[in-house]
Image (cartoon, grey):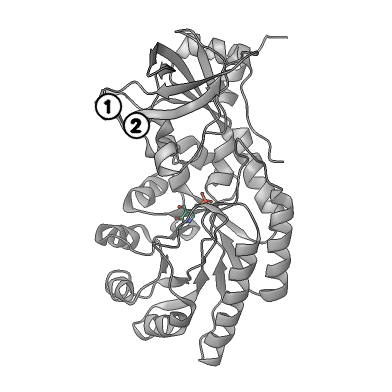
């Protein structure tokens, strides 16, 4: 089971007292362990961290120093990574439908690798980033993913060869294929099925005189949830074996987001109000749906709320601090009874949380502090 970074109660209390709440505490050691795990489990695969999952600068720098490549989705991410000193060769602009400004910034920063899934995008890329290397994104159906990305993206397999040919004819470098099995995919099957489809398409492309040389297997690697944890080592073994069988000579990329950052962050939040409404206990927290808990909506994620209490539980509603009635994160969530001022630790909240947080109602985003820079302050000195 994947390791989860967790503050203990004493550290949670000291940090809340010293820095206030809501507070996000990130372990860069855990980030690097997660990166190394995938790099070791999928040897030879170029890991492109999907920046969208958590664009925290210190996390990106730590991955940069570890040799990671990066999946960027926008002009903003390309500019940010360029400012950090990351070379354009280490980035793939992996958004099948790119903005005009995104393509202009790619040209300016020197990013030359792209994904696409439509004829319309070929024309735009050949005009704005002529000669760029392009990977065609193939649609994959996967009922075992939490977040389905394939209703929005991906060309059907029978469209692949005509699209690759069109890209080549318009002066692009038709370099390969990519797919994304959906985020938080709980089985290797979708990867293996997609790898087989791509092997067939590589052979068809070859028969048409196109030598594809890159396969990008996307992200989707799962982290433990409230209900289950997954044997990611077994999953990656299956994926690795399929790659060895079908793509022994091909350059392979992956684009993990959640797996790298998800388990590396804790939120510390505080109960700031309570009352009984419609016969249910309500707790108001100082972090809400418009903040770190935005993952409830955008990522369909169910967060664990740890209260450091034991004993009987009650079903309660948890709401955020804004004046909006939508700002309710959980209903009928089992919890020990809490007082105003009680601290709650939320582990495994590094992916698709602060990245999609807003400042609605004037609440600043929860600051992110790095555990390895703080721990001497909170651990008893020897
Ligand atoms: C193109 C692309 N690559 C990679 C990712 C990262 O996926 P995950 O966080 O599931 O690994 C996403 C997520 O939306 C994506 O859209």
Is any part of residue 369 visible from this angle?
Answer: no
- Answer with the quarter of the image where residue 271 lies: top left
Q: Which residue is mark 2?
A: 290
Mark before the other along the chain sequence, 1 or 2: 2
Query: Is residue 14 toward the left or the right of residue 362 in the image?
Result: right
Query: Is residue 66 toward the left or the right of residue 159 in the image?
Result: right
Q: Give the answer, above or below, for where 219 lies relative to 309.
A: below
Is any part of residue 17 visible from this angle?
Answer: yes
> Circle 1 — which element?
loop
Q: Between marks 1 and 2, how big is the CA–CA gap?
A: 10 Å
* Contact flag, marks 1 and 2 (Cβ < 8 Å): yes
Q: Whole-percent x and y of residue 304?
A: 56, 29
In the picture, which quadrant includes the C terminus?
top right
Q: Give the answer, above or below, for where 52 lies relative to 114.
A: above
Q: Which residue is mark 1?
A: 324
Residue at image position (67%, 41%) is 229
Q: Whole-percent x and y of residue 108?
A: 31, 59
Residue at image position (29%, 29%) is 359
Q: Nearer the viewer, residue 20 or 72?
A: 20
């Amino acid at each position: 089971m994947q390791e989860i970074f967790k503050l203990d109660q004493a550290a949670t209390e000291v940090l809340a007292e010293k820095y206030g709440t809501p507070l996000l505490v990130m372990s860069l050691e855990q980030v690097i362990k997660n990166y190394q795990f995938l790099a070791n489990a999928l040897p030879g695969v170029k890991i492109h961290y999907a920046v969208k999952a958590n664009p925290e600068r210190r996390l990106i720098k730590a991955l940069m120093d570890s040799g990671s490549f990066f999946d960027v989705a926008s002009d903003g991410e390309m500019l940010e990574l360029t400012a950090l000193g990351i070379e354009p060769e280490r980035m793939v602009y992996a958004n099948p439908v790119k903005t005009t400004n995104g393509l202009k910034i790619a040209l300016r920063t020197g990013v030359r690798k792209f994904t696409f899934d439509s004829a319309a995008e070929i024309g735009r890329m050949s005009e704005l980033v002529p000669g760029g290397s392009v990977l065609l994104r193939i649609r994959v159906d996967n009922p075992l993913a939490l977040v389905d990305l394939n209703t929005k993206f991906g060309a059907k397999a029978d469209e692949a060869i005509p699209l690759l040919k069109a890209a080549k004819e318009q002066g692009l470098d038709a370099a390969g294929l990519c797919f994304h099995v959906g985020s938080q995919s709980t089985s290797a099957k979708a990867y293996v099925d997609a790898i087989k489809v791509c092997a067939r398409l590589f052979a068809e492309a070859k028969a048409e005189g196109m030598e594809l040389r890159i396969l990008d297997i996307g992200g989707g690697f799962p982290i433990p949830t409230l209900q289950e944890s997954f044997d990611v080592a077994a999953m990656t073994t299956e994926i690795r074996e399929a790659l060895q069988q079908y793509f022994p000579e091909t350059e392979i990329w992956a684009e993990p987001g959640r797996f790298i950052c998800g388990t590396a962050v804790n939120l510390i939040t505080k109960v700031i109000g309570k009352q009984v409404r419609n016969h249910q206990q309500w707790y108001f927290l100082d972090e809400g749906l418009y903040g770190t808990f935005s993952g409830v909506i955008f990522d369909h994620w169910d967060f664990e709320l740890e209260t450091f209490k034991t004993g009987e539980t009650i079903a309660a509603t948890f709401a955020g601090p804004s004046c909006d009635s939508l700002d309710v994160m959980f209903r009928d969530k089992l919890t020990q009874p809490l007082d105003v001022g009680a601290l709650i630790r939320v582990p495994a909240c590094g992916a698709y949380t602060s990245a999609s947080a807003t400042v609605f109602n004037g609440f600043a985003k929860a600051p992110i502090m790095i555990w390895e820079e703080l721990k001497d302050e909170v651990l008893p000195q020897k």
